[in-house]
Each structure stands twice: as structure tokens, then as C-alpha cells.
Image (cartoon, rainbow, N blue to C red):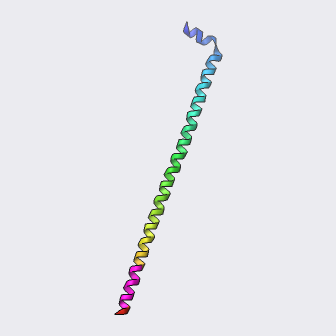
Amino acid sequence: MTSAIAYENPDHRMQSSDMLISKNHHIRQWLVIVGIVTIGLLLGVIFIHCILRLRRFYRLIELDEEKDSSACTQYENV
């Protein structure tokens, strides 16, 4: 008897399926937003990591140049 009642009003079924589609669409929008934010944060972390590696690399080059220049002045004084 309940199945007969459910099939008597097809508009009611359409409304409930529209509500489910609307909820799924809303959830899908939030998942897309969360995904975009996550990708943005990961790219930011990778970018910061690369900048720190470059700074460390150039700092090592500067230290080597300072060492070489101080060694040259020591030999000139001898």
C-alpha cells in the first residue's frame, strides 16, 4: 500500500530527486573549492621550499667566494 502511495504522486518523487541533485551539486561545489585551496597551498609550500633552497645555494657560493678572496690576500702578504 505504501508503494502505491509513492507512485500516485510522481511530482513528489521529482521534487525529492531535485533536492538530492541540489544537495549533490552543493557538496560538489564545496569539494571543488576545497580542492582548489589545497592545490594552492601545496604550490605555495613548494614555491617557498624552492626559494629557500636557492637562498641556501647562493649563500654557499658567497661563502666560497669570501674564502677564496681571503686566501688570496693571505698569499699576497707572504
Q: Residue at x 49, y 51 (%)?
A: 42
Q: Is residue 21 left or right of residue 59?
A: right
In the current view of this chain or complex, which residue is farthest to the right? 11
Q: Is residue 43 above or below residue 4?
A: below
- Given residues 73 and 6, the one toward you in this image is 73
Q: Which residues are magenta?
A: 66-75
Residue 33 location in percent, x, y? Answer: 56, 42
Which residue occupies 51% across, 53% down? 43
Answer above or below: position of 66 versus 6: below
Q: Could you tell me residue 77's position as x and y percent?
A: 36, 92
The answer to which quarter of the image holds residue 15 is top right
Quick one: 55 or 17, which is closer to the camera? Answer: 55
Q: Give the residue displayed 53% in from the left and 50% down from the top.
A: 40
In this picture, residue 68 sits left or right of residue 8: left
Residue 25: which quarter of the image? Answer: top right
What is the tally of numbered marks visible in this picture? 0
Query: Is 43 colored magenta in this rendering?
Result: no
Q: Is residue 76 above or below residue 19?
A: below
Say whether residue 36 is left or right of residue 60: right
The C terminus, quarter of image? bottom left
Q: Position of residue 56 (x, y in %)?
A: 43, 67
Q: Main secondary structure of the magenta part?
A: helix
Q: Quadrant of the N terminus?
A: top right
Residue displayed at 45% across by 63% down: 52
Can you give x and y, in whole percent of width and height, for residue 44 in the image? 51, 54
User: In this picture, is 33 found above or below 64?
Assistant: above
Residue 36 sits in quarter: top right
